């Protein structure tokens, strides 16, 4: 209907510009006819007729109507089509005022007590109506079928959510006092939504802008995936994402919106709070953010609902028969609209309406004061309610609501609409008084100075009303809880073949992993819960057999005959397909990983994601999403494939990863492993599933796997090997060389362990050095544990000091001698352990830019191949045992000869800076 009226008006606007009398007459006739069709056949009939007219004009004479992705600058929902408001507007206004006050007081008080502690008043102030209407009428904590809505709250609006929870009696006043003071006795409230810090309250960390919207999209899609695969039976829940208009600048905010429309995610609703401002100033001072977003989202196939003007404008808009007002509304830029927010009614009249006497006439019955108070759509509960109702009822595509608001609404001189408002954290006594009076909070002047919190008694009408509303909607929100029950451990038998090795056959650790995944997928218990996620890299990792085995998820099945249908491993898409083939988006894939890895809490389903990707495009590309996953207590396995700077041959600088294990260090609850052998992977994955899904630990895993085919050995039969693999270090081979005068300990990880084994042979055979070889599966685990011991010792000086695992284990070396550690990652990894290694530590690693070459040349270049390990060992021995008169020890001469014999060019470039 709206579209029809818009067209009608647009034509009338055009009509005012016509000079030719016949044209005017002709246009009138057409418009009258259209009005007749509208009155007789209704808006849909009129719409069809207009489409037919356009088609006819194109066919008959090639008339192409100009394309426009936007509609005029007015509300999408026609005022007469608004549903009645289902609650008490007055009561809800009073409740909203209480929430507003406490949200503001929380920030003001926190900054009075602790200068500079920060917080945001203006964001929630502008969004209060958007939230309150949803809390009172839309957010379902549980639906009829037992499903629920999930809500991504805008991070900076957190004070509003705390204030509401306080009024609901869920957060005590003492905690509000400790907003942003989480270490205070009794605890406090985290600045923004952080499930790690408030695991019973927040579900989604949204404050790193752009991560909320992209996650919401993939979450909504994952819900459909769960339903299509029969893992989730409850239905009807919506995913709501509350976003800032400035936040929409982030590439992540817009980057996946076509997935949402392609997948017809009508369970997804974006609400963008268009307060026209970001942190520094206007979002689009010289344009209109609402129009820009409308065009983008309409173009992408979303249902767009604009909520621009409040009810105060309805009458004027209806009286705008010739479309003058509409045209004027469309002319003004956001920067100028923002100016109206801070200016007087007289300025508004003169600047906005004053351009045309007919416009001035339209508002002559309104005083300047009334004009200044004309409400915007996002502050009008009836408009907001109508938009939400339409969004919830809409089917077939996702919806975005673009609601126009004023940043810092209610702050008046203290910041309303001003460029500084985002940073406003303090209100003086006068400003507090004005805010108090504007929202009718019963706090006397004398008590205002400290901005006290205010909560009416439990039996007050306001509290009773809000409690009743939440009861009707199934409970409080936000609430985070673990809804799944623990899994049973995966059968040991599933992993046994990997303990045996490959009996001399060559296999890469990627192949090993894929075989393990394929076995896990076949397991009757755990199989259906596995969620393989790939960003268009399955063939790279040899995973194509899984296409056929479990199918690729597609919400519509397979509507075409795949070109490789006749082959065994054809590209099979299916409605109940299990693989999430995300295409070339590591960010999107990571969001699917997160949705699957948090379903144990969000949906009570223990899905176990395995995200298999090019390790180079993980931490350094989507590190912030990995950080968010950690915050969310996400479970699952990140599998960095084609890893290792020198193990990935040919690909060069932008592909060769020699630092993801360094980038994995900062993530507190992430366990990172660089395994060398099949049995190590088996032990790690088996234990990981147990720790995450049986024991319920809030951890997740990063494993690098490589594509170098190598013979996988059998797991040595030695006590404690399992524990060693998991703790990060065990002795793989003990020297059988008896009576050697020189001894050394070699540490290797990943594929470089094979170079270490070659070096051991050379050292023993050619240089008479007895060498033990150790497999280091996780430098991160060793570093953490050692740190923990040191810290404990410092804090408990009178107790028996703890000895770090790495020290204890390496002390068991078969003799003294230096420790030489080599890996395909940066030298800093082994070096991080230097102080706990019982001897001199020399680290070899792959610092520097990669380049296209074969493995042997790369390892020579980066100095991590067997010959460089040999040289580093001899050099370390020379330092420890310089040659004595009796000829024992290692001389400089010997080193020089070794360099020659090993074929090392002493003048070669330093790879770290080449
Ligand atoms: C990735 C990222 N970059 C920068 C920031 C810092 N920041 C916090 S709020 C803000 C402005 C937000 O503007 P908008 O999205 O319009 O939200 P509003 O407060 O206006 O509702 C910025 C830049 C952030 N939180 N995340
Ligand atoms: Mg904004």
Image (cartoon, grey):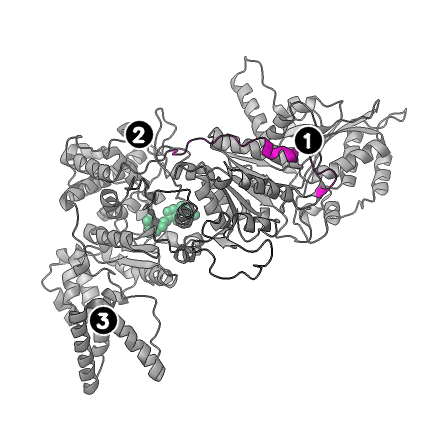
Tell me if residue 430 can be seen.
no
Residue 63 image point, x, y percent:
34, 80
Q: Residues within 10 Å of mark 1 (few under 14, many from 20)?
A: some
- Classify mark 1: helix, strand or loop: loop
> Label 3 near label 2: C-beta < 8 Å?
no
Q: Residues within 10 Å of mark 2 (few under 14, many from 20)?
A: some
Q: CA distance from mark 1 to mark 2?
A: 53 Å
Q: Could you say which is closer to the camera, residue 110 or residue 898?
A: 898
Write the residue at 32% across / 38% down: 478
Q: Which residues are magenta?
A: 481-506
Residue 1 image point, x, y percent:
22, 65
**In this view, 446 is above or below 80:** above
549 in magenta: no
> Label 2 near label 1: C-beta < 8 Å?
no
Asked if the residue at label 1 sits under 8 Å from ligand 1, the reply is no
Q: Which mark is residue 715?
A: 1
Residue 111 image point, x, y percent:
32, 36
Point out the tag, 1 or 3, that comes first from the N-terminus. 3
- Classify mark 3: helix, strand or loop: helix
Q: Residue furthest top?
A: 798
Q: Residue at label 3?
A: 46
Point out the tag, 1 or 2, that comes first from the N-terminus. 2
| Callout in the foreground (2, 3) | 3
Asked if the residue at label 3 sits under 8 Å from ligand 2, the reply is no
Point out the tag, 2 or 3, that comes first from the N-terminus. 3
Write the residue at 59% across / 48% down: 616
Q: Could you say which is closer to the camera, residue 371 or residue 1?
A: 1
Q: Residue at label 2?
A: 175
**In this view, 798 is above or below 757:** above
Q: Which mark is residue 569?
A: none
């Amino acid at each position: 209907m709206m579209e029809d009226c818009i067209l009608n008006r647009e034509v009338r606007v055009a009509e005012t510009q016509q000079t030719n009398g016949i044209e005017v007459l002709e246009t009138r006739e057409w418009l009258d006819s259209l009005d007749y069709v509208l009155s007789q056949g209704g808006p849909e009939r009129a719409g069809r007729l207009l489409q037919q007219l356009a088609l006819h004009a194109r066919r008959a004479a090639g008339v192409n109507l100009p394309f426009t992705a936007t509609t005029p600058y007015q509300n999408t929902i026609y005022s007469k089509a608004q549903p009645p408001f289902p609650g008490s507007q007055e009561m809800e206004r009073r409740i909203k005022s209480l929430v507003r006050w406490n949200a503001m007081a929380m920030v003001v008080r926190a900054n009075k007590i602790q200068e500079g502690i920060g917080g945001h008043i203006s964001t929630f102030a502008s969004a209060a109506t958007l939230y309150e209407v949803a809390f009172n009428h839309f957010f379902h904590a549980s639906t009829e079928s037992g499903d629920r809505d999930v809500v991504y709250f805008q991070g900076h609006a957190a004070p509003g959510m705390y204030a509401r929870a306080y009024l609901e009696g869920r957060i005590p006043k003492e905690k509000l006092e400790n907003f942003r003071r989480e270490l205070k006795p009794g605890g406090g409230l985290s600045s923004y939504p952080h499930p790690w810090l408030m695991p019973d309250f927040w579900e989604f960390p949204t404050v790193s802008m752009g991560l909320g919207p992209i996650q919401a999209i993939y979450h909504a899609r994952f819900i459909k995936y769960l339903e299509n695969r029969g893992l989730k039976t409850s239905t009807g829940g919506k995913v709501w994402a509350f976003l800032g208009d400035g936040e929409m600048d982030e590439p992540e905010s817009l980057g996946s919106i076509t997935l949402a429309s392609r997948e017809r995610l009508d369970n997804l609703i974006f609400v963008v709070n268009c307060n026209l401002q970001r942190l520094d100033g206007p979002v689009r001072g010289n344009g209109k953010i609402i129009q820009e977003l409308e065009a983008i989202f309409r173009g992408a196939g979303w249902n767009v609902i604009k909520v621009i003007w409040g009810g105060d404008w309805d009458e004027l808009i209806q009286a705008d028969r010739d479309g003058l007002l509409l045209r004027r509304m469309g002319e003004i830029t956001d920067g100028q609209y923002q100016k109206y927010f801070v200016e007087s009614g007289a300025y508004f009249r003169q600047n906005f309406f004053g351009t045309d006497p007919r416009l001035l006439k339209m508002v002559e019955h309104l005083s300047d004061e009334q004009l200044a108070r004309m409400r915007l759509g996002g502050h009008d509960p009836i408009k907001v309610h109508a938009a939400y109702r339409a969004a919830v009822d809409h089917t077939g595509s996702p919806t975005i609501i673009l609601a126009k608001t004023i940043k810092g609404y209610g702050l008046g001189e203290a910041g309303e609409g001003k460029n500084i408002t985002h940073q406003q954290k303090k209100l003086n006594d006068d400003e507090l008084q004005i805010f108090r009076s504007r929202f009718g909070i019963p706090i006397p002047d004398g008590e205002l100075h400290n901005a006290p919190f205010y909560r009416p008694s439990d039996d007050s009408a306001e509290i009773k009303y809000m409690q009743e509303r939440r009861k009707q909607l199934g409970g409080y929100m936000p609430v985070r809880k673990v809804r799944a029950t623990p899994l049973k451990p995966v059968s040991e038998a599933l992993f046994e073949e990997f303990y045996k090795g490959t009996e001399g056959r060559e296999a890469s650790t990627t192949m090993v992993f894929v075989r393990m995944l394929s076995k896990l997928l076949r397991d009757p218990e755990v199989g259906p819960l596995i969620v393989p996620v790939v960003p268009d890299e399955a063939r790279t990792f040899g995973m194509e057999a899984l296409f056929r085995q479990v199918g690729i998820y597609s919400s519509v099945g397979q509507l075409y005959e795949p070109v490789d249908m006749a082959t065994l491993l054809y590209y099979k898409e299916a409605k109940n397909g299990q693989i999430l083939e995300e295409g070339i988006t590591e960010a999107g894939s990571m969001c699917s990983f997160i949705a699957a890895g948090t379903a144990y809490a969000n949906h009570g389903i223990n899905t176990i994601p395995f995200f298999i990707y090019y390790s180079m495009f993980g931490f350094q590309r989507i590190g912030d999403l990995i950080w968010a996953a950690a915050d969310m207590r996400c479970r699952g396995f990140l599998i960095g494939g084609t890893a290792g700077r020198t193990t990935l041959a040919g690909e060069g600088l932008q592909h060769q990863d020699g630092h993801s294990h360094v980038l994995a260090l900062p993530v507190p609850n992430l366990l990172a492993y660089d395994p060398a052998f099949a049995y190590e992977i088996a032990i790690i994955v088996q234990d990981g599933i147990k720790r995450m899904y049986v024991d319920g630990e809030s951890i997740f895993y990063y494993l690098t796997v490589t594509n170098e085919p190598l013979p996988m050995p059998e797991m040595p039969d030695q006590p404690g090997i399992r524990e060693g693999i998991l703790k990060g270090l065990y002795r793989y081979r003990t020297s059988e060389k008896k009576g050697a005068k020189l001894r050394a300990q070699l540490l290797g990880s990943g594929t470089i362990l094979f170079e270490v084994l070659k070096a051991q042979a050379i050292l023993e055979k050619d240089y008479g050095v007895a060498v033990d070889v150790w497999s280091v599966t996780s430098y991160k685990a060793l570093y953490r544990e050692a740190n923990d011991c040191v810290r404990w010792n410092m804090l408990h000086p009178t107790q028996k000091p703890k000895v770090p695992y790495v020290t204890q284990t390496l002390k068991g070396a078969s003799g003294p001698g230096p420790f030489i550690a080599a890996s395909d990652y940066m030298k800093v990894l082994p070096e991080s352990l230097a102080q706990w290694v019982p001897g001199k530590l020399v680290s070899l690693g792959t610092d520097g830019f990669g380049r296209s070459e074969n493995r042997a040349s790369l390892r020579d270049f980066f100095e991590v191949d067997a010959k460089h390990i040999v040289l580093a060992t001899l050099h370390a021995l020379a330092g420890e045992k310089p040659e004595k008169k009796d000829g024992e020890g290692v001389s400089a001469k010997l080193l020089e000869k070794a360099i020659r014999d090993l074929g090392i060019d002493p003048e070669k470039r330093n790879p770290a800076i080449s």
